[in-house]
Image (cartoon, grey):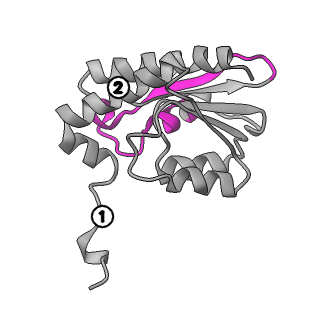
Amino acid sequence: MTGEIHERHMARALELAAGSFGDGGCPIGAVLVDHHTGRAIGEGHNGLVQEGNPIVHGEMAALRNAGRMRNRHNTTMYTTLQPCFMCAGAIVQFGIPRVVVGDAENASSNETIRFMRDRGIDVVILDPGRSAAARNCIELARRFRELKPELWLEDWGGGPNPALRAT
């Protein structure tokens, strides 16, 4: 897949993320693309605020929108933000072979990228120096983190559980 294709699909994921942000929600969008046709077969955005559902992250919404499929072995997931462990687990579970990430800068670590790569997933992180979509993904998440830090933390599970920390 070429940079032009990545840019086009990431721009759509960003459009979904921006729409969620405009509705007061978390600005994370995703698009699931079929390798054979090059068309989106599922798309969505984070639904924490709009649906009151902490499990509907952008990637989960795109999977839900794509509906039932025999498998997802010929797809690419485009996501505006590096997937969390829940979404990375779903990507691994369903055998999605490639993930294209618009923003890996606003995540706290690269753990989920390593997790997916260790399981054979081709993780492509768009270079903000070359990709306008990546720059816009990074800026949108940065702005959201500044404006709504409590919602950012809630979306990522509320932070570390102090009861589980070693003493």
Quarter assignment of residue 38: top right
Where does residue 149 sit, x and y in percent of width and height?
20, 41
Residue occupied by mark 2:
139
Residue occupied by mark 1:
160
CA–CA distance between discs 1 and 2? 25 Å
Quarter assignment of residue 127: top right
| The stretch drawn in magenta includes residue 38 | yes
140 vs 73, left or right, is: left
Q: Is mark 1 on a helix, strand or loop?
A: loop
Against 124, residue 158 (above or below) is below
Q: Is mark 2 on a helix, strand or loop?
A: helix
The answer to whether one can see residue 27 in this image is: no
Q: Residue at x 34, y 41 (%)?
A: 53
Return the residue found at the far front. 129
Return the residue found at the far bottom. 167
Q: What stretch is highlighted in magenta?
A: 36-63
